[in-house]
Every structure is written in C-alpha cells, then in structure tokens.
Image (cartoon, rainbow, N blue to C red):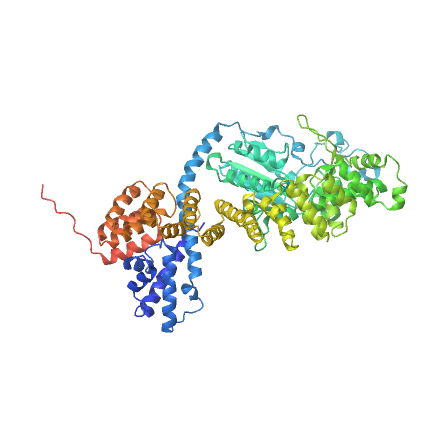
Amino acid sequence: MVGTSGEDAFFVGLRRLGQIHEQHLARRVSLRALSRGAGGPVTTTIGAWLDGSRFPQQVDALISVVEQLRTAAAAEGVALSASEAHLLDPLWWRDQHAAVARGRTETVRAGVQRAQAQAVRQEQQMADAVGRPVGELDPFDLEVHHSIETTGWPRRFSHVFSFDASPPSASWTTHRDLPELTPYIRRPHDEELSALTRRGEAGHSGMAMLVGGSSCGKTRACWEAVQALGEGWRLWHPFDPTRPEAALADLQKVGPRTVVWLNEAQHYLLPSTGSLGERVAAGVRALLQDQARRPVLVVGTMWPEYWDTLTALPSPQAPDVHEQARKLLAGTNLSVPSAFSPLDLRALLNDRSKDPRLRYAAERAADGQITQYLAGAPSLLDRYRNAPAGARAVLQAAMDARRLGHGLALPYSLLADAAPGYLTDQEWDQTGDDWLKQALVYTAKPCHGARGALTRIKPRPGQTAPSTPHYRLADYLEEHGRNTRHGRPVPDTLWEAAFQHGHAENLFAFARSAIGQNRPEDHLRFAVKAADKGDHAAAWEAAETLCRQGRPAEALVMYQRAADDGAFLAARKKAAALLLQLGRLDEGLQEYQAAASQGHLSSVHQAVTLLLDQGQLEAAATWCQDLVEQTDLDILDMAISLLRQAGRGGAVTAWLCELADRGRPGALGRAADLLQQEGRAEEAVAWLVPLAQAGYLGAELCVADILEEAGRHDEALHWYRQAAESGYPSARSTLARLSATTPPTAPPHRPPA
C-alpha cells in the first residue's frame, strides 16, 4: 500500500509538470488544447491536475496529457535533466497513478475491514482459550534438552565435585539431589527476551525468533524467559496431529496473555505441502496485530539455514512462496551463539558453588560449547564414529534423509530400504538376518541421559499410531551430518526409498535437493509426485521444468494444479498461454478469465483481447462489467470504454453511481467526473454531499473540486477543509492556494438586539 509520502511525491511530480508546461510549453499547447486532446476532462480539471490540487481519476486522460506535453517538448527543443526525464514518461505516470490509487483503495477498504474484524473478535472472545498456565508446564514437554547425568562418571573426574577448601561438614551435592535442569547462565540474548516479556506484561504483543545451531540453548532460553511472566499467563504449544495443522486449527482461539510456543519453527513455517506454512505465518501475523487479543507473545527457535530460506527474497519472476513468513520474521531475530565467551567460562570455572555438571562441561566442552556438551553431544558423536557397520549405515541414511528434506519423523521402511546402500559388499555379506534390529537397538541407547542417536517416536495417549514405526535423529547428529556430508553423493537406495516411503509433505524438498545432487530425473519425478499429492509449489516447478523440456501438454497439467493455490496466480496465466499454443482457444479464454477473477490484472487484458479478436465486443463488455462488481481489480476505465464501444454508454454514469454507493473503490471519482462532463454538476453535488456528510472517504474532495470548478469558492473552501482533515494532501495544498486568492467573505449582517 502506498502511504502519504507516496501520494505526496505523486502531487509534487504533477506540480513540477505544471511548471514545465507554464514556463516552456504553454504557447505550443494550451490547457484547452490539452483538454481536447485528452478527450474528456474540462480545462479547469487539467489545470487542477497540473497544479497538484486534484487527483486524476482517469489515468488514460492523464497519460494523454503527458504524451501531448512530451510531443510539445520535443517540438520546442525542451530537454529535461536526467533527474526529471521521467516526468514526460507515460509508463512512469501509469505506474505511479496505480500505486496511489491502490493506497486510496486500501484506505476505503480499511473501514470495512475494521467492522468485520470487530465481529470476528467478538466471536473469538467467546471461544475457550488454548494453552495451559505457564506455572503448570514441564520444560521437557516443551522440548528443552535433558542434561547429562552424573551417574557412572569415572573416579578420575571426582575432583570436579570436591571443594578443596571446604570444612569437613561441607560436601558437594550428589547427582540424586541435583535438579533436572542445570542452573541457567544468562547471555546477551536473554536481555532481549526479558525486554519482550516486560513489554508483554505492559500489554503489548511481540515476537522473538531465536536463531542458532543445534543444542546451543535456544529452547532453554525461551523457557527461562517465560518463567518471568506473572499470574494469568498461558502457554500454547501446538503439535498434534502435526505442528502446522495444530497451529492453524486453533490460532483463532488464542486469547490475551498467551505465549505461542513455536519451537523448531521451521516445522510450522516451512512444510513443503502447498501453502500450509504461509497460512500459519499469516495467522500468526494477524494474531500479533489483533488489538482485542493483546498481549500475546510468540517465541520460537530455528536453525540459521531455515532462517535464510524463509527470509530470502525470491529471484525475479519466481513465485514469492515465503512472503508471509518473511514479513512475520522481519525484526524478530535473536542470534544465539554456539559457544560461551571466554569470560563466561572463566567465571564458571572459578565459581565453586555452581552445579557440578556445569563445571564438568566447562572443563571438557570444545570451544566453549557447553550447552551442546550438556545435551550429550560428545557421546552422540562417539557412538556414531564407533558404530558397527549396520548402525553406521542407518545413521548415515537418516542424516542424508534429513539434509535432503525429510521431516523429523523417519519411517522404518525408508531406513530399512535406504541403509543397505551405505554398506560395502563385504559389510553387506557379513550382516545377519536381524542386522537392522540390532542397529536400531544400538542407535536408541541414551547418551548420558540425553536422547539416543536415533530413537523411536512413541505416540502420546490419544494420538493415532502410524502404520509403521517412525524414528527421530538426534539434533546434534543431524547438524553434524549437514556439516560433514554436505555435497556428498547419496546412494540410489535412499532416493528410491524416499520416493516410495517418504511423507508426501517432504517430496518437494527431495525434488529441490536433487538439483544440487545433479539428478534431473529425480528432480522431476519427485516434483510430479509431490504435485499429485497436492503440493502447488511442486506443481509449479514441475511445470516450468516440463516447459523447458518441450513437453507442453504435461506442463499444462502441472500449471493447472499449481493454479489451485492463490500464491501461484501466474500459473493459470501460463496454462492459458499453453492452451492457446495447443490450439485450444476456448479453454485458454476460460483460464484467462479464471485468473482474472482471482486478481491477475494482465489476464484481464489477455481475455478481452481474445474476445475482441473473435468479434465478441458485447461479451467482453459484459464480462468486464461483471468482473468490476466481483473484484477490486483496477479495470473501471477498461469496463467504461468497452461499454461505450458496445453502445451502452448511456447507462455508464448510473452504473458508476450505484457502484460508488456500494463502496467500490474508484467509482465515486469517475461518476463525479462523468456527471460534470454531462453538464450535471448540480446533480453531482446533490448526490455527493450526503455521502460526504456520512463520512464516505473521498466524497468531500469530489464535492470541493466540483464547487471550485463552478466558481463557488466559499463552499469549495468548506469542503476542502473537510477533505484536509480527512488526510488528503492535495486538499491541503489546494486549500492554501484558494485561501491566498479568495478574499474573506463578510459575516452576515445581523440587526442589533
């Protein structure tokens, strides 16, 4: 939406254009000549445009004026500087006019939306609030990592837990007396989180997304932050049946003083099925902007690579598939370092009162990565590096499946079919019949109390158990796999296993990964299968690939599937073009019309051109008129032109007045202009004044313009003041001009009392 600054810039350009005309071109082309050439607006209207006091409702008339001035400038030898050359460029003016018109349209629409939002809020307030009181929650239910345990530590480490200078009665606490969570060590990002919770307590909604590598303390930081919230705060962690589905199902039920917990937020915002992630992002944005449900806090965690994917701008011409997520995440990033600073480490090692597990980790963690050590990372790596061949193969298959795009839950059948490809012939010959069972027993063993390398996911009570067991790879091993196996070729067995057993929502991610692995056939077959399962982004990519391969009939099917999602409006246009290429004109016209009904402006022009080429002027006019009434597309001028060409010009003014009465953006100004052109200025004023008095946006400015043109300056001044108070910059500039040139009227004479 274009704000006030964009509208101000537009009027500055108009005023400068007027100065160029007055100083250099008025002798060559007068205002009257400009009016005749524009085919409609009267001289005073053109003058008001060029002094920046009136917004041109008819963009085609404005473009005609610019083209006449450009021709005159060429004839007079007037050359503008590079910084002003755009003022004689019709395309520049058309773009600027469209931007300002959209801004005005949004202003009108905002009033309607506020009323609708109020009704929605009233319904939401009656719904049961989701979530549980913060004080009743278990950190491990919110996916905070378990810490390493002290049981079984070698005697050579016992010095860590002794106080050399302690009196005999003092001794360090045994592991049985230690809390489940180690004491928390605050870092700079914690101050930002505290500021967020303070704003929440003060009644303001807000969001923070903690970005950092695996096991660096992101989730624990969020947990510690919400502990500071006062009585009455709830926390909602959506995860059943899947994270994005759970979020979408109950976002409308989130009430005030609620924390929305989006741990591993990529699973909410980056599922590859259709536009599910974008719908979640849009819902969270709406929640944060909802005044009636404040305060709401959203806290989440994410790895850096997912942040990059969600916040990167799309390449030119590519669909913007993460627009909502990018806007949601803007300004929410809190970076969590992977390691503690040397100063923190020294303080921790010198503080004898600290939890022994912290000091143990501080002495042994590589490069200050205490949180990773506490989560059992070293033991995980040891178990992976020392794993028997079968277990190593299963872990590598899981690592590759995750880095190529599979979700957290890895099906048993996928691992069983993929893992043999990671074994040499000799290793495979030496495996026993139960090698996979033994491998999964090995990978499931906990590491110092933390989750094992690859563990079975146990369904919670009430959850539907999947038909085949599913397994989860430890976060730290997943990150290790991404770092150490990046770019390595993947065995054919994994590609085939993923194609046969991978979850539908992960197929497109495999398709994208196949590009980097130089497997074009896999890229296409995964994308097509994902499209068959309802993934519109995959359908778009499959269609583009098929087009490049010269397979238009197959590409057409994919474009049509992609077009079912509003994020891929261009797909319907491309499908229409392919239908024309295949000689299926009627179907192509239907596709263009469908794209137009969904808001694709260029498809309107394509459909109208097709209809006119077939001699169907009446059909084109009727369709355009219907489209105006069904959408907010900026096609009023086109509809007016077609109706006139079809011999229905006499009914255009009445139709525009009816549209304006119903609140159609742009109709009011055009109706007022037509009434003026038809010599019905008094009728226009009589119609507009009640609308202006009722607060109809834009009506005050139209009344003022008509009254000024009629020479009724005192009345015009009154309505320009009203328009200026409503926020129209052009009204303010016109008010200043008229006030300077119109003498004040004497107050009415009153006889003495």
Which residue is outermost to the left?
Answer: 752
The residue depicted at 68 percent of the width and 25 percent of the height is 461
Q: Quadrant of residue 401?
A: top right
The relative height of residue 652 versus residue 19 in the rendered view (above or below) is above
Q: On the rendered image, what quadrant is the C terminus found in?
A: top left
Residue 350, position in %: x, y?
71, 43
In the rendering, at what x and y percent does residue 241 appear?
64, 32
Judge from the rendering whether residue 292 lies leftward or rightward of residue 269; answer left or right: left
Q: Name the side, left or right, on which 142 lies relative to 203.
A: right
Q: x, y (%) of residue 534?
A: 62, 40
Q: Residue at x 41, y 69 (%)?
A: 80
Pick the front one: 709 or 600:
600
List x then y, in percent, for residue 508. 66, 45
Choose top left, top right, bottom left or bottom right for residue 24: bottom left
**Figure check: 636 above or below 125:** below
Residue 194 seen: no
Question: In the displayed image of the protein, which residue is found farthest to the top?
Answer: 462
Name the residue nearer the viewer: 609 or 363.
609
